Amino acid sequence: MIRKSFFVSLCIIWFSSDEVMSVTEGESVTLNTDIKLSGQIEEIVWTHKINNLDNIIAEIKGKNINIYPNVVYGDRLQMDNHTGSLTIRNITTEHSGLYKLLIRNDRALSQKTFTVTVYAHLPFPVISRNCSLSSSSSSERSSVSRLSVLCSVLNVSAVSLSWYKGNSVLSNISVSNLSISLSLPLEVEYQDNNTYSCVVNNPITNRTTHLNTSQTCQERSEPLQNSHLVGITVSVILVLVVSSAVLIYFHQRKCKSAN
């Protein structure tokens, strides 16, 4: 259950500060109070804004520490009994959002806010390829073998996907908070000596897959050549079958005439 009540003080002086934190899913994050508990502090309350409501998730009253169980956090929350700092273990993207720390003593009420963004683990980009024959000019006699490649990542949000040639960006595409799949094409010459890589990144981490332009790849013309060979083979077999049938027919006819 998440509590939705707040304490009230008749004599209130506000001291606000903000802190922005970015973490990766599965890590632990600690929201620090930057104080040490003393007899003057009567109450510490931690809230998390869920559905536009500041919900109390943990508090300290006197010497009593209360962590309120709920389906969002399970047993992930832990409070330091010396400082009142809040730790969220094995954090998930559900725990992103605005947290407020409220501290009340006998004379004042102070507030500190934390904006926490949790990013999912990034997958490595997957590069798929097709080989094609093309020429840069119709006057050229020999065609240049080129690689048409596609870099893809599945089910990502708040990321950018980019093709690099060395340290230079060739192209990129981005997505904000929607969880979708991204793809980015590229065409290079076969056995190009330059270094190409596909990179997916968010504000705190990245994943890279390198393109090997020297890797062998079956040309589109080869299946056509193979189909021609199959056609020729079938034609030869048909000629042999027909020839055999004609020879057998005349042989049987000759035998009947002799009888």
Image: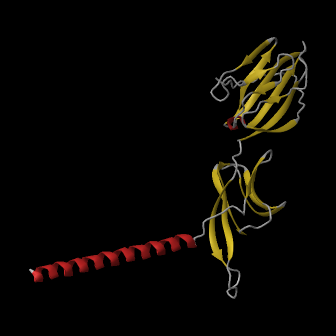
Residue at 86% of width from left, 37% of height from top?
18
Q: Is residue 77 left or right of residue 21?
A: left
The colour scheme applied to this rendered structure is: secondary structure
Q: Position of residue 250 (x, y in %)?
A: 20, 82
Residue at 50% of width from left, 71% of height from top?
226
In terms of image quadrants, where is residue 76? top right
- The number of callouts visible is 0
In terms of image quadrants, where is residue 169? bottom right
Nearest the viewer among 208 and 245 is 245
Q: Is residue 108 left or right of residue 69?
A: right
The vertical placement of 181 against 222, above or below, is above
Nearest the viewer among 15 and 73 is 73
The vertical placement of 96 against 131, above or below, is above
The vertical placement of 238 against 194, above or below, is below
Q: Position of residue 72 (x, y in %)?
A: 65, 30
Q: Which corner quadrant holds the N terminus?
A: top right
Q: Which corner quadrant holds the C terminus?
A: bottom left
Which residue is at the far left?
A: 259
In terms of image quadrants, where is residue 56? top right
Q: Position of residue 100 (x, y in %)?
A: 79, 31
The vertical placement of 206 against 57, above or below, is below
Q: Position of residue 168 (x, y in %)?
A: 83, 62
Nearest the viewer among 234 and 182 is 234
Residue at 85% of width from left, 27% of height from top?
32
